[in-house]
Amino acid sequence: MSLTSKIAGLTLHNNFDSRSFDNIADTELQAPGYEPTKFSGKAAQISQVMDALDDTGLIPEALIEHETKWFYEQLGIEDTFFATESVQAIASHILALYSSKVDAFARGVKASDAVGTSFHHKRVAEDGSHAVFFATGPEALQFEHEIDDFFLDKPADNSKGAYRLESFASTLPNGDTLRCDFVYRCDFSTVPTTTDASIDSVSDATFAKIATPHTKVLYSEVLRQLESTDGPVVKHFAIASTGEERIIIGYRRNSSSRYNSALSTLADYYGVTLKRKYVENFSNGYSILSMYIEHSDEYGPEDIIYQIAKEASLLYCVPNNLFHDQFALGSMSVQECIYAHCGVIFVTHFLNRLGPEYSQLKKLLLSSTSEDPKNLELVSRLKERLTSETYSQSYILECLENNIGIVRRLYRHFVDTHYISSSLEKTLSYQRVAKIQTISSDAQFDELIAEDCATNEGYALVLKALYAFNKSVLKTNFFVTSKLAISFRLNPSFLPKEEYPNTPFGMFFVVGSNFRGFHIRFRDIARGGIRIVKSGSLDAYSKNRRTMFDENYGLASTQQRKNKDIPEGGSKGVILLDVGKAQSKPKECFAKYIDALLDLLLKDPSKEKIVDLYGKPEMLFMGPDENTATFVDWATLHAKKRGAKLGFPWKAFFTGKSPSLGGIPHDHYGMTTLSVRAYVEGTYEKLGITDWSTVNKLQMAGGDGDLGSNEIKLSGNEKYVGLVDGFGVIVDEDGIDKQELLRLAEDRLGNDHFDRSKLGPKGYMVMVDDRDVTLPNGQFVQNGLLFRNNFHLELQKIYPRQDFVKLFVPCGGRPASINANNVHFLLDEKTGKSIIPIIVEGANLFITQAAKIILEQSGAILFKDASTNKGGVTSSSMEVLAALAFDDEGFTEHMRIDEKTHEAPDFYKSYVKEVQQIVVRNAKAEFNLLWQLKEETGKTFSELSDQLSVAINTLADELSSSKELWEDDITFRNEVLADAVPQLLLKTLGIEKILKQIPEAYLKAMFATKLSSEFVYTRGIDTNPAKFLEYISSLKRKFAAKNL
């Protein structure tokens, strides 16, 4: 008999490697897989426990032996517990169980039914080394939540805080189930010598001692698979002779909150008995959970194994969903709950709550011939107020809970569109959903809502938004077995034009354990950063949740305007961490977000196919942003691991990666700052300022940041009179010591590292933690944090005269720090003039558009972020271009710095210099055009910047869709592309290889952007056909002269 045949006779539905069952007897399979060391002192301990119980006088003497033996012999508790627990602790457990009987008897419950009536008892050792929990009914689940929160969900890098769990189910005299949970702190200090040193080297000492050799073999296979995957590993088998199913799940520790208790709820939902459960933690950061499911006459082994294997992955993504209580009660299946959970989040963000009145008011305020910039702010704040005070997430949740029947039908509608039949038809959940009536048309849905929500317009609006969610989903990984988070590619056409006038090209929506996220792009080929938003309090989280999509949309829009010179349009991704423990898990949430996006971007042969209603390949190019800079290398290598190759190569997926991976770090080469400085120095030149030391400068963000540190390095002898960063404020009217600032910038240190001895007589520092500080001018500062936050609005109080600060360069800070409601603090009360003559906005969205226009109308020279800080995006685009143009071998040779010697290839060094030149050239071209247009039109730079971006982007969009220019004159097309490619790259590869290597969609974008940006910078924003034809003719003459 072959080994496989032999195993097939012993087990059913086994997805382990057949070698893991070599030489295994049926008797060993039926055993629990653990052989606890016999506790030699057990008999003596029993005697001592009975004595202790007798001393209390709380249990009649005649019952002490019965109660003690019942506890030791009938509950299935293993010797590991008795060897660990003290006599007094065991006696307290027995007393607690006995007291429940007495309490039940007092309430008239029969003696045989006494134990198990809402019983719960726990004890946690004072030193936290172990804990024990006994409970029946709902209290058992509450205890499991507590076990998860305080013991199992510990950071993976905290081996000292790791715990293991042994859980047993015992049947009480009345037939109820008593859940006994025993938690022990892991001990990784010793490596026992046994037959399987590979797993023992990372095992807890107790596991290494009591686990059978076969258990170690099975767990070793799971650990090996975890090394090569990122989601949970679900293995299973059923014992043929008994029908008992065993499901063994491996996952990264603390990667999914309350996963242990969620799996218990899953077993309860299907009415199966979870006889045993073990959770083992290993020092390499992985957890393995084993479930022993008793044979059920209602379900065959295949049904349960297949179901739990599918749903364990789904629960891993969102274990503690908003509808968990409905799941625990059996009212909704796992899939229905998580679908509804995602739906609540979607509806919370996108329910059209503004109505026609808002649209009419907006039109009235913004269509006036004498439009007031403050109206822009008023409309924006009115929108925020309306969206925050109408339908809250709790109301939306209430609506869905009160309309579960409609939610189920909407889920069936979702299933009918997106499931893969072969993967679901076997599952119990699909058998259930197949019995639910679907929604076959819009008219049928409207009839359903009219009938069920006739008297509640709010509920009708919520359910219509959920239906809109269904109709907007183009593809999803919801039904893929192995995933880290749930992702949806949405058609953004559902966004109301009144709120979002420019409809994005594409949109992704991601929901995971501890976070939610969006990704918006305004072109097919687009690039932008991914940021993580943290919240220090529940109030902050509520605000961030309310504004995250609008912030995402605004950032992507700004990126679209900023990216006018490069092939990639604008995009942005935002990840909002849940409040609480999630705030300490930014990398885990980032990893899940990225992996879930890749599920929808790549055709992974190791995963099930998905229904793709979009039907076209997609490429996303990303970069670092707030709280994600240190995760970029991981994302790059993860894309490589997931198989991102031709057309969407891993090396182009993320910019901002380490030079060893071919990245061009903005901070090291000052890419973003080079474009900001082009505007500062261009203004000096226009105003005739030659002595920079006469310029008193205020800067937001200091030496610890990219833009801030390089701004200091490139600032020449400008006189810093104020520097504000996350740590606090440095002020010196006579000028902050420049050498000390340069030291901070070189070492990437914040203001808290400034040497106070370098301060002049009028200098001072106020850190965010400072309290009750008196400044040299006599001003009293009660709270350092508030002083820092409002510093830029208190300049008239802080400095000796109103026009003291000559240059303001915000290099960091939260969006809308200056807005129409507070901009008056920067205006002279008497004259109405701006107190700062020059403002160059380096940080994204630091000043709102309305505030910018007000400042410019009040005399300030102000350049906005979309113009000034585009150096970084230009550099990133050149990084993407090199990654696309080179194959992997060529990219390694020319673009990757040696990790050991840190020596950069000659090509890399020269390429970076050429990129710097391109950054400065583009910035100067835009600056000069803006200055010219202002002189010609009298409009503000802020308005002209937007008009210039719109002119370039609109022309580029038209050109990219033009078959005539792309297909009819291939020679001209290739000449334009050759002119767009950095000359070093062109010289190294040649245009033929570049054209062959780079995807056509990217080449089209590069062709269109090159023509549109150069035309506007040289001919102005008037893009009439005659001027454009003349421009094309001049280009052809230029190319002919160059003999390209």
Image (cartoon, rainbow, N blue to C red):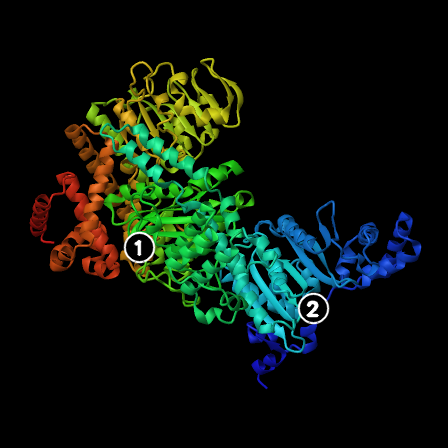
Label 2 SS: loop
Eyeballing the image, is 127 above or below 117?
Answer: above
Q: What residue type is labelled 1?
A: Ala
In-image side of 679 versus 594 (left or right): left
Coordinates of residue 813 in the picture (x, y in percent): 40, 33
Coordinates of residue 690 in the picture (x, y in percent): 23, 23
In front here: 152 or 395?
Answer: 395
Q: Which mark is residue 883?
A: 1
Residue occupying the far bottom of the picture: 1
Coordinates of residue 189 in the picture (x, y in percent): 66, 54
In front here: 70 or 670?
Answer: 70
Classify mark 1: residues with Cα within 10 Å, few (<14), some (14-19) or many (20+). Answer: many
Classify mark 2: residues with Cα within 10 Å, few (<14), some (14-19) or many (20+). Answer: few
Label 1 vs 2, first from the N-terminus: 2
In-image side of 876 versus 260 (left or right): left
Q: What residue sits 54% from the left and 58% below the top?
A: 315
Q: Which mark is residue 99?
A: none
